[in-house]
Image (cartoon, rainbow, N blue to C red):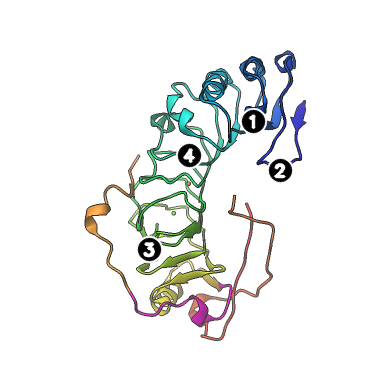
Amino acid sequence: MSWSSRWSESDGVRLPKGIGKLKELQILEVVDISRTSGNAIKELGWLMQLKKLSVVTKGATKLKCKVLCDAIQKLTCLRSLKVDGSLEWLHDVSSPPPLLRSLKLSGRLGEIPGWFGNLTHLVKLYLSESAIMEILVPLPNLMHLRLGRGSYIGEKLAFKTGAFPNLKNLDIWGLWGLRGLKFEELYIVGLTELREVKFEDGTSPKLELMRIANCVLRSGIIGVNQLPKLKQISLGPYGQVAKLAMLQSEVGAHPNSPVLRLFNERSYHDLGDVVVQVEEATEESSSLHPEPAAAGGSSRSQAVGMAAANISQDDVLYTYNSC
């Protein structure tokens, strides 16, 4: 049994009192917490078969968010949770749903909640507008990480050895300030401060696809040769990197013969030899510690792929896929 709102997710629906009587309910989306009574929110904790929950907390009082926090901790069968709006109350969670596999958060988070380290079954993690200054604790089963617009504050995004051994998809959107990068699929969109993406040896041994849009990587992409299963790098709209020629050369020499796809002509994406040094002092605080919207979209472009070693300056290669 499911109950789903098809309204804009910025609105949602008001839950009626008595929702807790739907003992077999498995899917509930999208709930507007600000418009729902405290008693009805409390009854969410009675839905012991609930597997998927989506809520909007924008405008909700602290008291209602606390009641929601208590209710979510009782949902032991929950597999998917999406929250849009106020997220401060998430720091008060002490016992997250043990079987959670998908977590999508849109709103200011600041610090990563300590209980993230307990999400051993988590496969998907999407963050947007979270303004985190650090990345993540070890998540051994994470396969899809999406960092959307405003999700990360920092110039360097480095993925340390052993951090995400099963990561396949990494999406980074709109990190304009990022200077350096590192993940099977990597999506980077709208991180305005990002300048660099860097991959160390053994960081993401299963990473296959890297997609970058709305980001200006003035220090480029470093460590492509450390991704043994890499199949494709795509530079989408407003995706620009320093030393594109060097990146093409590294991709062309890669033993797995990956493809480099461009949304526009080569000059559109190439920043040339401009490289901005990222302060080493910030490296530790902005690294992925050993232990993944605006992303995705519905638009798609068809393009003909070819080995990066054969790419000329006039070739236009681009593929845009949503998860």
- Label 1 or label 2, whichever comes before in sequence order: 2
Q: Are marks 3 and 2 in contact (CB under 8 Å)?
A: no
Q: Locate the N terminus by quadrant.
A: top right
Element at label 2: loop
Q: Which residue is mark 1?
A: 53
**In the image, 264: left or right of 200?**
right
Label 4, label 3: how many angstroms apart (C-alpha)?
27 Å
Q: Counting residues from the N terminus, which is met first, the one under dot 4 or under dot 3? A: 4
In the displayed structure, 78 sits above or below 201; it is: above
Q: Earlier in the sequence, mark 4 or mark 1?
A: 1
Considering every residue shown, the one lying at the far left of the view is: 281
Report, in whole angstroms, how far the alpha carbon at label 1 lies from the one at label 3.
Answer: 35 Å
> Looking at the image, do the residues carrying marks 4 and 3 touch, with CB atoms under 8 Å apart?
no
Q: Residues within 10 Å of mark 2 (few under 14, many from 20)?
A: few
Q: Tell me the kind of residue under disc 3.
A: Arg
Distance between the alpha carbons at the discs numbered 1 and 2: 15 Å
- The percent position of residue 316, horizontal first and vertical second, equals 59, 79
For marks 4 and 2, the one nearer the N-term is 2
Residue on which disc 2 sits: 8
The image position of residue 291, as x and y in percent, is 35, 39
Instruction: Provide the residue designation for mark 3.
Output: 195
Identify the residue position indicated by label 4 in the image: 141
Q: Mark 1 or 3 closer to N-term?
A: 1
The correct choice, above or below, for 310 with respect to 90 in the image is below
Question: Three-letter amino acid code at disc 2?
Answer: Ser
Per the rendered image, the range of residues in magenta is 262-274
Image quadrant in which you'd find residue 164: top left
Q: Nearer the viewer, residue 118 or 93?
A: 93
| Mark 3 to mark 2 CA distance (whole Å) | 33 Å
